[in-house]
Amino acid sequence: MNDITPVPAGRSAEELAGLKNITMVIYGLQALSFLYGVTALVGIVINYVKRDDVRGTLYENHFDWQIRTFWWGLLWGVVGMATIFLLVGFFILAAAYIWTIYRVVKGWLKLNEGKPVLPS
């Protein structure tokens, strides 16, 4: 495996290391949201605040992935809660839960490999 991530022009290795740490923290916050839902809100705020800083780097792809994971997870969580009285909501919530776990794990693993989550 190649652990060397190319340094984009105008970016220092230290800056990229900091961006990688922030990206990893956000994955951690998303994972913690299964126990404490508020951590997902903290993560999405960080995503939007630091979004301009990651533009043009590998981490931009991860931020897009994290943002989509949050909003789609929230949407399906709301749909599941709204339909829970029909019993189908339990299945929707379970599917959303499993899907979100998959996205957090996949993103975290790709980040550790130094790869984008989805090819550009």
Image: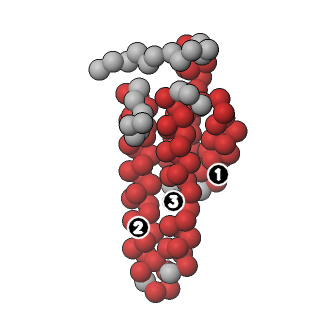
Kindly report the distance in space between the C-alpha atoms of the residues bearing marks 2 and 3.
Answer: 11 Å
The image quarter containing residue 13 is top right
Measured as percent of width and height from the top left, residue 29 is found at 56, 44
Which numbered mark, 2 or 3, is in the foreground of this view? 3
Dot 2 lies on which element?
Answer: helix
The single residue placed furthest to the left in the displayed view is 1
Q: Nearer the viewer, residue 16 or 89?
A: 16
Tell me if residue 36 can be seen. no
At 43% from the left and 83% from the top, the residue drawn is: 87
Where 29 sits versus 95, above or below? above
Question: For the residue carrying disc 1, how many other residues have a C-alpha within 10 Å: few (<14), some (14-19), or many (20+)?
Answer: some
| Quadrant the N terminus occupies | top left
At 41% from the left and 67% from the top, the residue drawn is: 94
Question: For the residue carrying disc 3, how many other residues have a C-alpha within 10 Å: few (<14), some (14-19), or many (20+)?
Answer: some
Q: Are marks 2 and 1 in contact (CB under 8 Å)?
A: no
Q: Which mark is residue 94?
A: 2
Report whether 24 appears left or right of 1. Answer: right
At 64% from the left and 37% from the top, the residue drawn is: 51
Kindly report the distance in space between the C-alpha atoms of the residues bearing marks 2 and 1.
Answer: 20 Å
The residue that mark 3 highlights is 73
Q: Are marks 2 and 3 in contact (CB under 8 Å)?
A: no
| Quadrant the C terminus occupies | top left
Q: Nearer the viewer, residue 51 or 23?
A: 51
At 60% from the left and 30% from the top, the residue drawn is: 54
- Amino acid on which the number 1 mark rests in the picture: Leu
Dot 3 lies on which element?
Answer: helix
- Amino acid on which the number 2 mark rests in the picture: Ala
The residue that mark 1 highlights is 41
